Amino acid sequence: MKKRILAVMLCGVLAAAALTGCGNAGEDGPTATLGQTQETTPEQSGSDEGGESSAAGGTESTPEETGGEETQEVEITMKEVSPMDMVKEMKIGWNLGNTLDSTSTSIGAVVEMAWGNPKTTQEMIDAVVDQGFNVIRIPVSWGGQMGSAPAYNVLPAWMDRVQEVVDYAYSRGVYVIVNIHHEDWHFPSEENKDAAAEHLAALWTAIATRFRDYDEHLIFEGMNEPRKIGTSVEWNGGDKEGRDVVNYLDQVFVDAVRATGGNNTIRNLMVPGYAASSSDTALKAIVLPEDDHLIVSVHAYTPYDFALNTAGRSTWDNDTRDIDHLMEILDELFLSKGVPVIIGEFGAMNKDNEQERVQWAEYYVGKAREYGIPCIWWDNGAFDGDGENFGLLNRRELTFPYPDLLKALIESAGV
């Protein structure tokens, strides 16, 4: 990575932000289109049930709050915690899936409820935290709530709503992960690399500036599953070009966050390999950015035939091989070298097989705990139908329909 080139690029982004202000999309902002259909990705499944419209809360943002020009040095107000020590404090986590990660360009709560889940409340987060989860990952899609190049201004109402949901968890003293999710503009090719880097730097400048004063409990995750969407190499570990560009964009993300100063100079950050894949090919190709506060992000719905394949088997069959191999290679590549790992998404979908999932969860989470790897359950709010039913919390009733599975997750994590 050539630091000088990145510095010039980031200066250009920050200069553009200063001229236009990152807090207002202006005439270049996205057009509101109500009722846009959500596409289901291989990692998720959502309901097609619509949600009611309401305005997002929060106050209007200033350019400085969402990534504008800095005119003074910002003080560090949090303690410095090594990523390894931080990860040791994490037990088990929960994803607020199929919610703020909507790619709809609608305005207000219509975006948040586009998957069919209800609007997030403090009570929902409390229900999860009260069970013992001490990590809340909040996937967020930003592309539909941003203006055009070069400023890529984030709509103030969207930034405010994201912050409001972050505060639901942050106020409970748990670890909170914010990412960028379902973005296709960072397609990892050489042809698109420079445009993706400019966009990524502008967005993370805005996010990092808004959340700069939060303490070490807030973690930024640079990208979700960066991959060549719609190609033959999308899910198989990628090709060399794609893997190399993802490594490059990871460095762009880190540099953009660090440039915002203050607590962000020492904040722990999560970076993925290609598609956040757990394949050997993708994991071995990860080249970490030059930084001392990094955590590797991996997604692993394994064994695939049981955990993620809708047409696969419903029995666990004590199939431990893939889980064992995953932990071993993560240890070899990262943990043994002092680099912590978080499995940012995992789960086994409902196939009317709770007791099988209980046995699987006990082994998966227990094995990960042996290696010091916290796991974050992917909860998309889906319980019924023929899709990817990873629902754990019934968000409307604030209940957990699979109590034995919940107990297995919590106890196996050592909570």
Image (cartoon, rainbow, N blue to C red):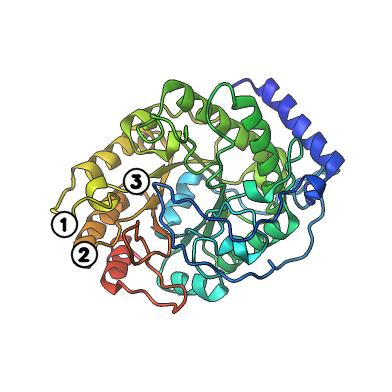
Q: In the figure, residue 36 lies in which quadrant?
A: bottom right
Residue identified by numbered label 1 = 315
Evaluate if marks 2 and 1 touch, with contact meaning CB atoms under 8 Å apart. yes
Q: Is residue 365 above or below residue 56?
A: above
Q: In the figure, residue 187 lies in which quadrant?
A: top right
Instruction: Report the amino acid beneath label 3.
Output: Ala
Question: Mark 2 and mark 1: span between their CA atoms?
Answer: 7 Å
Instruction: Report the amino acid beneath label 1.
Output: Thr
* Residue name at image x 62 percent, y 44 percent: 266
Where residue 255 appears, x then y in whole percent? Answer: 65, 34
Q: Is residue 368 visible?
A: yes
Q: Is residue 58 above or below residue 223?
A: below
Q: Which mark is residue 300?
A: 3
Q: Is residue 368 above or below residue 150?
A: below
Residue identified by numbered label 2 = 353
Evaluate if marks 3 and 2 touch, with contact meaning CB atoms under 8 Å apart. no
